Image: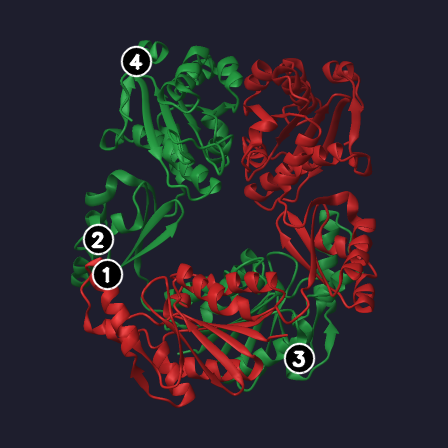
Chain colours: A green, B red
């Protein structure tokens, strides 16, 4: 088996500006190809340290994947270190220069002298052409070890690995049958306990299950040796946590939701307070979203809720902006004002300031207006930071819409549906909170 | 200065299950204390690889911070590797055993035999008591280097670093002087050519400059040995690319913009077509944003632009939704409808579909309505994906607002200001495109 190691280069990886993601991604992809990543080294933009790291890595690996430091600026010295390590000079590659100049010209960018640096490679290196970004990669050998140098920008790095590394490693085990199921609204340990027995089933049918939390969604990844085993695994999962499904296979949440709206020939509008545009941004994440989204209302201030959506001032006064009554009027008002099939609304306290004993940070109310009435949901998010509260809020309100479209809303904890009369004279509504 | 390196241990860090976060966090905290993290190594749960990594790290560091592999299960072998590295046996520490048994009893957990492993340390090691979690840490020395072993669970790791590392580093050395300057609207190589001469200056004053691209912003990071040198470096940068500055020091772009609006006692509203909420989301990224943002308009469809903002149907018909004329009417209409000091507007083709020969994907028009008239800007983004076009659009329109507030707008390529008459009878406007 190929002994694979990674070397990630950049001061920004060591002083806390960013955490390296390339090595972990490389490890995951290598593992899928049946090969292990043996070790990772991270060093700063320092010529001698890079050379030393290459030398050390070359002694315990067959293949070193190097990322970072190939850009045009003076602190990008990886190519110099590679040359020093193998004892070669850097030389200009005319063909790469020509390609790069042409690409810059096509885009109307000025080709500055420092861009020429990106066309310099250690003498004798194999040059690895790119179809992404501007920097070409290269490969050199020493101590019986081959070192491949790729740009550190994650999309470029990934393209180089897919193109130049993965086809060369691993035993290429028979292609596994895979499924990805994404869920929202369950914690990771909650999901795992609901799936009780899945490890035994996996053992029985020769399958593997793994979990991946990409906040706020949790993915269950299934791999099996044949389609029948995969079906049994998938059934096991969906029987137990099917109601929380938000995406499957290659689709994104936004794609699934968009397709469901198209299938119903339905449109949706948004009335956002705390989320302030994030719900609409998610709805329009994909091309063609004008098919289901025409307009939305950002009503941060109370006056905006009244002017734009018709929320009654006495409701705001009696119950506050962050209340079931206000959010239901926001949704009903937006649906009427936009002439849309559905409306979603949010109002809450995302923090870090603005909480009160009654309504602490993380208190968010949601409403979904439908042709059959208005649904309400309240969530008390733990105070894990403004961005996380808002991200989860987007998923909460849009999964209500998805589940309604897919006939699964009654499997979730929601109040309603409330009629127009109840929403607009809401002193009489009883909403569990 | 203490030469600090990190060694992170665990198969899960190499097969893609999780990406290590401890090293980046350590680097950030060390930098705050004026010390650099020189290198990071990541290896799996393999006795010989851990020993080899300790040996290598000890040769180029004074202090190694080791994380992970101190748990009770069979794959936790870091303590064995530490013992093997220094040539000592593991021995049971009775005091730690007693503490651990008592802690388990208090919590009502069963104390299983494998928990005893957590009380074994290499003979002669310094034992580092914990007040978090269950595993104690320890320290050993070899090759003139001290290695400290901490649990890998991030909250525990952090506690150990705060307690046993940070107080020991940085006190001795002069604190480094740092500055972060963030720019928008210049490519990385373009920025570096404008900064021509900075490497020479850096050498002269004993400073360092590094660049980091976090799309779509580029950061210039300066480190110097004293405040006077840092000032000279900062001046050099700001004299040359000051007009493109969008954030400085610890502040985010949203924070700087919010503060500028507060300083001017100004409010802003948004009229978004292609960006569909992303501009407002950025404006409200921070707590207290209701101080400058009250409402916004998401006008994806033409009818919405007319109904909500008063864009004239004949303008949409003659020039299209993606045009200088439309976007200027959107901004002017939003400013009037919201009664805000400023309005920003976007209309464009984010792709991947929807482009035409005249208006290819990446064509975006921007407007900024001010008390003195409406400014227009057109950008032809290269087609690098929907998400990137929209992210850059948010920065383009909000940097116009920031630069207007800070009196820097006339240093940029914009058309205008157009008066109300010109905007609302725009057949007569000549806007360079």
Q: CA distance from mark 1 to mark 4?
A: 48 Å
Would residue B90 appear left or right of B376 to someone viewing this image? left
Tell me, yes or no, whether dots 4 and 2 are on the same chain: yes
**For discs 1 and 4, the disc positioned in front in the rendered view:** 4
Residue A264 x, y percent position in the rendering:
35, 25
Q: Name the mark on residue A207.
A: 1
Residue A81 x, y percent position in the rendering:
66, 76
Task: For the residues labelled 3 and 1, say whether their Cβ atoms are less than 8 Å apart.
Answer: no
Image quarter hosting the C terminus of chain B: top right
**For discs 4 and 2, the disc positioned in front in the rendered view:** 4
Mark nearer the N terminus (3 vs 4): 3
Secondary structure beneath dot 3 equals: loop
Mark nearer the N terminus (3 vs 1): 3
Residue B399, quarter of picture:
top right
- Disc 2 chain ID: A
Residue drawn at the location 22% of the way across and 60% of the way down: B106
Q: Name the mark on residue A419.
A: 4
Q: Would you name the residue on which mark 3 appears?
A: A124
Task: For the residues labelled 1 and 2, say whether their Cβ atoms are less than 8 Å apart.
Answer: yes
**For discs 3 and 4, the disc positioned in front in the rendered view:** 4
- Disc 3 chain ID: A
Q: Is residue B25 visible?
A: yes
Residue drawn at the location 75% of the way across and 17% of the way down: B426
Residue drawn at the location 51% of the way across and 69% of the way down: B165
Q: CA distance from mark 1 to mark 2?
A: 8 Å
- Disc 1 chain ID: A
Instruction: Categorize mark 3 by other alpha carbons within 10 Å: few (<14), some (14-19), many (20+).
Output: some
**For discs 3 and 2, the disc positioned in front in the rendered view:** 2
């Amino acid at each position: 088996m190929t002994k694979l190691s990674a070397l990630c280069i950049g001061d920004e990886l060591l002083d806390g500006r960013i955490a390296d993601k390339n090595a972990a991604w490389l490890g995951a992809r290598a593992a899928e190809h049946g090969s292990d990543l043996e070790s990772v080294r991270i060093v700063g933009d320092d010529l001698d340290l890079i050379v030393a790291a290459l030398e050390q890595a070359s002694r315990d690996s067959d293949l070193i994947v190097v990322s970072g430091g190939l850009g045009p600026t003076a602190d990008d010295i990886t190519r110099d270190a590679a040359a020093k390590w193998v004892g070669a000079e850097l030389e200009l590659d005319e063909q790469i220069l020509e390609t790069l100049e042409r690409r810059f010209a096509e885009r109307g960018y000025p080709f500055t002298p420092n861009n020429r640096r990106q066309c310099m490679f250690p003498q004798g290196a194999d040059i690895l052409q790119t179809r992404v970004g501007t920097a070409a990669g290269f490969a050199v050998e020493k101590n019986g070890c081959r070192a491949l140098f790729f740009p550190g920008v994650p999309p470029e790095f990934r393209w180089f690995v897919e193109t130049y590394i993965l086809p060369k490693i691993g035993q290429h085990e028979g292609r596994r049958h895979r499924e990805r199921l994404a869920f929202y609204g369950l914690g990771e340990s909650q999901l795992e306990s609901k799936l009780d027995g899945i490890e035994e089933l996996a053992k029985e049918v020769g399958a593997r299950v793994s979990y991946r939390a990409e906040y706020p969604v949790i993915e269950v990844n299934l791999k099996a040796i044949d389609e029948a085993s995969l079906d049994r695994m998938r059934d096991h999962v969906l029987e137990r946590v099917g109601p929380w499904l938000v995406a499957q296979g290659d689709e994104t949440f936004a794609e699934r939701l968009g397709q469901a709206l198209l299938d119903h020939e339905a449109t949706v509008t948004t009335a956002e307070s705390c989320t302030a545009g994030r719900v609409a941004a998610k709805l329009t994440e994909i091309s063609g979203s004008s098919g289901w989204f025409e307009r939305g209302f950002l009503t941060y201030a109370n006056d905006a809720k009244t002017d734009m959506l018709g929320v009654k001032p006495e409701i705001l006064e009696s119950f506050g902006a962050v209340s079931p009554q206000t959010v239901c009027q926001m949704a009903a008002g937006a649906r009427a004002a936009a002439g849309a099939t559905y409306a979603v609304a949010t109002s809450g306290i995302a923090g870090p300031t603005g909480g009160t004993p009654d309504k602490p940070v993380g208190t968010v109310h949601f409403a979904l207006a439908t042709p059959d009435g208005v649904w309400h949901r309240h969530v008390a998010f733990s105070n894990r930071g403004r961005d996380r509260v808002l991200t989860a809020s987007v998923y909460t309100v849009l999964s209500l819409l998805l589940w309604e479209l897919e006939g699964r809303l009654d499997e979730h904890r929601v109040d309603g549906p409330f009629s127009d009369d109840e929403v607009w004279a809401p002193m009489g509504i009883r909403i569990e909170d």
